[in-house]
Image: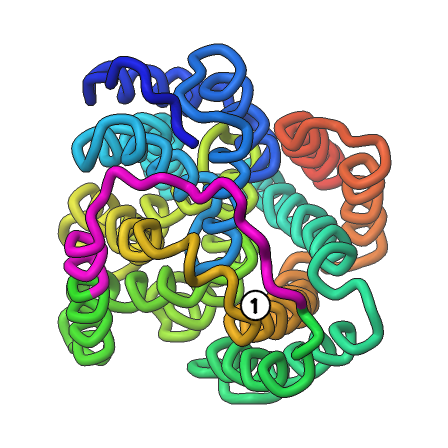
Amino acid sequence: MANKGQRSSPGEVFFAFLRLGCISFGGPIAHLGYFRDAFVERRKWLTEAAYAEVIALAQSMPGPASSQVGFANGLLRAGWLAGLAAWTGFTLPSAVLMLAFAYGYGHAQGKVAAAALHGLQLVAVAVVAQAVLRMQRTLAPDLLRLALALLGAVIALFAAPTYATAAAIVAGALAGLALLRREGSATDDDPLPSSISQRAGVGATAVFGVLLASALLLSANRSIFPAVLASLYRTGALVFGGGQVVLPLLDAAIVQRGWLAQPSFLAGYGAAQALPGPLFSIAAYVGATVRPNAHPLLLGVCSLVALFSPGLLLMAAVLPFWSTVRRRTSIRSLLGGINASVVGVLAAALYRPLITTAVHGFTDAIIAVAALVLLAYFRLPPWIIVLGVTLASMLAALL
């Protein structure tokens, strides 16, 4: 149960999360550790049981898990304004840095600069390979779910790019319902209390649905501004499995439509690995660098909101009902199938576009494998990997 002590002001929540947004390196799992230390151990805004429930909820729906946990923390602590303050504070540092990188990337010239940017693409290869290994152990640990992951990979590789990822997720959901009926229902002796009424939850659901319907209608718009925002909102509504899964979805939504070159996209994705805060902040970079683009800063900020909004709305929609919904075996079976297929989708994205675009020869392969070993087995911080791989790529270019 959440701490029943004095409620915090939105300003207090904002500055608490702003500090975390400046220091939270290491990806979603590390972010959850930072949150636990700050809000369970030190500030005691949530109990251990309540915090575990919030994490379970975030991992059961589309969206960026760590940002959703932070948003829920603010909601439970002091209501809607505090929830938005938590998201804004945690996201702001990385969003500003990604916008700055978008500007710098457009001005990078010369052989050394090109090598540095190529190094960021190789970082993306290592990071996604590590994500595939970790997710397989937790989301597809047995033969049945490995088979669902393989099915997801095949669909993602051979279906038309515009709907391949969505088709893989739907197939995983249906297979999970049919084949994972042994997934047990959860018990909940200490239900998560919610400061949001069920009426507000229904309202958030309605807003999510209206925006999703609008996004489906506007994604084919000839004007790039509404089309990009619609594509990003639709992408944010499909990202099961954590921030790394946004790669194939953004590739299909933005790169395959010719709005952003593949090398530019992968460079931004690699740069995002070195920054604190949520990986979804890459949306600011994407919005600022798509072409044609008359208002890069405005589109960057709006793109950030568009990619995050579905996950935040879903958190607000489900939170009042979560203690009841999570007990249903059919829901858990469906989520198990989705999560397994997501492993396959990410493995497919590791091959194409990452490896096919970023690895140009034996030297690139050695650098990427070395980065993977340092990440997965020696557990070096991602920012060190980014720095080291970038320097190695520049050195290889000079030699």
Above or below, comparing residue 16 to residue 183 in the picture: above
Above or below, comparing residue 19 to residue 183 in the picture: above
Quadrant for residue 9, please give it.
top left
Q: Residues within 10 Å of mark 1 (few under 14, many from 20)?
A: many
Q: Nearer the viewer, residue 16 or 49?
A: 49
Count of labels shown? 1
15 horizontally vs 215: left or right: right
Span colored in magenta: 184-205
Residue marked by disc 1: 332
Label 1 secondary element: helix
In which quadrant is the C terminus drawn? top right
In which quadrant is the N terminus drawn? top left
Q: Position of residue 308 (x, y in %)?
A: 32, 50
253 horizontally vs 316: left or right: right
How was the colour assigned to the protein in this rendering?
rainbow
Q: Position of residue 67 (x, y in %)?
A: 41, 40
- Amino acid, disc 1: Arg
Q: Position of residue 178 (x, y in %)?
A: 62, 87
Residue ID at (35%, 49%): 283
Residue 112 appears in the picture as rendered: no
Q: Nearer the viewer, residue 312 or 352?
A: 312
Q: Is residue 283 magenta?
A: no
Residue 372 appears in the picture as rendered: yes
Above or below, comparing residue 282 to residue 293 in the picture: above
Predominant secondary structure, magenta span = loop
Q: Is residue 203 magenta?
A: yes
Above or below, comparing residue 10 to residue 197 in the picture: above
Most extreme residue toward the top is 42
Q: Nearer the viewer, residue 102 or 277?
A: 277
Q: Position of residue 247 (x, y in %)?
A: 52, 59
